[in-house]
Image (cartoon, rainbow, N blue to C red):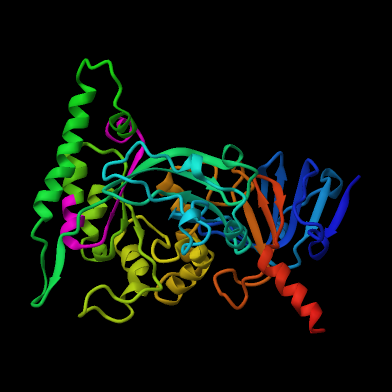
Amino acid sequence: MKSIIAIGLLFLSGLVQAQTQKILLENATVHTGNGQVFEKGLVGIENGKIILLRNSLAYSYNRDDWDTIIDLDGQHLYPGFVAPTSTLGLTEIDAVRATIDFNEVGIYNPHVRSLIAYNCESDVLATVCTNGVLITQSTPRGGVITGSSSVLHTACWNWEDGVISADDGIHINWPSSLERSGEGLKTHTKYAERKRELQAFFDAAKAYYSSDITIADLRYEALRGCIQGNKRLYVHADEMQQLLDIIDFAKTYEIDFPVIVGGYDSYMITERLKQAKIPVMLPRLHSLPMHDDDAVDLPYRLPALLQAGGVSFCLQNEGDMEAMNARNIPFLAGTAMSYGLTEEEAIRAVSLSACEILGIDKHYGSIEEGKQATLFVSSGNALDMRTNNVTLILMDGIFVSTTNFQTELYVKYKKKMGL
């Protein structure tokens, strides 16, 4: 039987397990993530996929063809936002060591997999999901080669259920090229030595691949996909010398998909990055300038500077308390919008661009026919913390609760105080 559902009544009982086959979202302002906007949008969903995207003013449809019709009444519909290179699901309370599962012992750990440590029962995940961040790249930390990340949903029963892209790439913390002394910043005395050590590890891996050794080395096997295949190599670095050396490193070792994570100084070498086709996951915008003589608003302007330079980029939130602060991903995009990006460019920076860099854009990142129905609705502009109010979440076409323990406590004590 067909039902027309008012959006405010949809989630009174939390996660909705059963769902009808064909769902129509109507009367929404649809931000597709690829730059298009439909003021009176229609989005049709069947078996978890988007099968219809139209402007209702220019498209006739039979309402009897849909099992469930949800009237969004002018609210804003977005593709699921993405939290790249994050410890979401790998930590619960940063001050409690027993809840931290992202930092392994050792220096060269390409064989470490964050996927199997991902905790779908994390309360932190729910607070992030209900702000519109529906996809995360669960990433290990520690050492020089930290291990393999995976891309997952932020709401799932277990990691097998939530995985989108298993072991999508290896992460490297590039040695720092600068150190601070009484005279200010200068070249790090051990930079060349540490860089040679990293190169020696890759040389040993290449020699291993071309040898007849029958005993497998798990570290080199984990790295094989980056050197010989299509896995990404995520290199965490910010300083100019680091970025230039990473470009040369990727060329020397014929890395097909290098990605710079951070790249604070990348705005000064946009032409080099563009020619090398190396995308950048920009550092947290809500930060102080890195260098003493930088403009105070430089971190806010980095997205616009890379956009102008033609460099592919997305936003991420690596840093202190990054798991719980991943809920601020939409507001990082809002800051980028205030400092040079258009609204749709800012949305793209936390949706489609992130998925392109992660290699999952065939199925995620934008609201387009044929893609997975991973999207959310906000009653106001989702990039503004004053108006971000998520009222509906669909993850691969499955309804997900829009409440978390914080909203439940808010309602509980509001009721207790008679407010």
Tell me if residue 44 comes above or below residue 286 in the rendering.
Answer: above
Q: Position of residue 32 (x, y in %)?
A: 57, 56
User: Could you tell whether 375 is left or right of 224 in the image?
Assistant: right
Q: Position of residue 103 (x, y in %)?
A: 38, 50
User: Could you tell whether 34 is left or right of 198 in the image?
Assistant: right
In the image, residue 367 lies in the stretch drawn in magenta? no
Q: Position of residue 144 (x, y in %)?
A: 26, 48
Q: Does residue 331 appear in this view? A: yes
User: Could you tell whether 262 is left or right of 328 in the image?
Assistant: left
Q: Residue at x 22, y 43 (%)?
A: 250
Tell me if residue 170 comes above or below residue 319 in the rendering.
Answer: above
Where is residue 269, by image quadrant?
A: bottom left
The quarter of the image holding the N terminus is top right
The quarter of the image holding the C terminus is bottom right
**In this orientation, which residue lies closer to the viewer: 267 or 183?**
183
Q: Residue at x 66, y 68 (%)?
A: 406
Q: Residue at x 77, y 43 (%)?
A: 22
The mark tally for this picture is: 0
Where is residue 415, by image quadrant?
A: bottom right
Q: Does residue 390 appear in this view? A: no
In the image, residue 231 lies in the stretch drawn in magenta? yes
Residue that extends furthest to the right in the rendered view of this protein: 1
Tell me if residue 335 comes above or below residue 141 in the rendering.
Answer: below
Tell me if residue 287 comes above or below residue 367 in the rendering.
Answer: below
**In this orientation, which residue lies closer to the viewer: 347 or 85?**
85
Q: Position of residue 153 (x, y in %)?
A: 57, 48
Q: Which residues are magenta?
A: 224-245
